[in-house]
Image: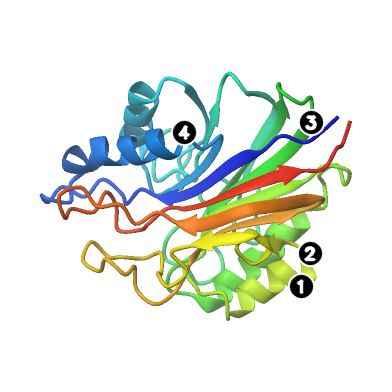
Amino acid sequence: MTSKELRIMTYNLKCEVGVPPHSWSDRREMVRDVIRRESPDLIGTQEGVFAQVSDLLEMLPEYGLVGLGREGGSRGEYSAIFFKKERFQVLEYNHFWLSDTPRTIASATWGNMYTRMVTWARFKDLQTNQQLYHMNTHFDHESLNAREKSARLVIQEAQDFDSALPVLLTGDFNTDVHSQPYNILTEEGSFKDTWELAEARFNEDLGSFNDFRDPQGGSERIDWVLGRGNMTVASAGIINDLADGRFPSDHFPVVARLGLGDNV
């Protein structure tokens, strides 16, 4: 069976800050419009709390959600996975926490102040009958030790997946591509950066963290779409849309168009 193109997005939504013009109520329609225009098949989001991911589900009814608050249940920020319901069936999913006790909800043991986690799902593509995994995460912003150990734990947990299936990894990694966490994932973990694999790239001169003020997105690409397995990447880029000069989030989303090799 011939592989069919997938559009993958990673998007840090910025948590529900209450100060205009950056409050969620000021931004949610802009975020909706970005997602609707790009129409990704799979989205890994970071920082959104329950009210935010619920809003997106209401505004974008074509998507379903796999996710859990990092403090358990609906509490805390989500590393959520949105998927197009007409295209994907969820076969299994789970969560683990980036700590020495990954099965303990809200655990943090590596010196990071905030709880960090991974949400993953195994999907069946209803258009092609292919299966794939999608992992989504948000690494710590302060602790290098936590980021390095998080990268190794992602690799360790992915070893339990069916090795015949491709794995997509999206996230806000809070570090650039010249860092040790990136090297761990791409060298020890055999993940490939879709940015580097892409036949074409757009907005190569931009970073992905705009901090609500920098239309260039800073100097670094800290949000990545990585993949493991048989895949080709047609394009990758950074979406730097502004609405009347306003930023939908303090991160720009990163997108990739890719094709997966057969696994059925």
Mark 4 is on which residue type?
Gly
Q: Quadrant of residue 219?
A: bottom left
Q: Measured along the vertical axis of the image, is residue 63 above or below residue 236?
A: above
Distance, label 1 to label 2, CA atoms, is 5 Å
**Does residue 165 appear to the left or right of 254 in the view shown?**
right
Q: Secondary structure at mark 2?
A: loop
Residue picked out by circle 1? 187
Please state, as top left, top right, bottom left or bottom right, where the N terminus lies in the image. top right
Mark 1 is on which residue type?
Glu
Q: Earlier in the sequence, mark 4 or mark 1?
A: 4
**Percent from the top left, x then y, of residue 164?**
88, 43
Residue picked out by circle 4? 73
Q: Earlier in the sequence, mark 2 or mark 4?
A: 4
- Closer to us: mark 1 or mark 3? 3
* 10 Å crowding of disc 1: few (<14), some (14-19), many (20+): few
Residue picked out by circle 3? 130
- The extreme front residue here reads 200
Distance, label 3 to label 2, CA atoms, is 21 Å
**Percent from the top left, x then y, of residue 215?**
27, 66
Residue drawn 57% across and 41% down? 7
Mark 2 is on which residue type?
Ser
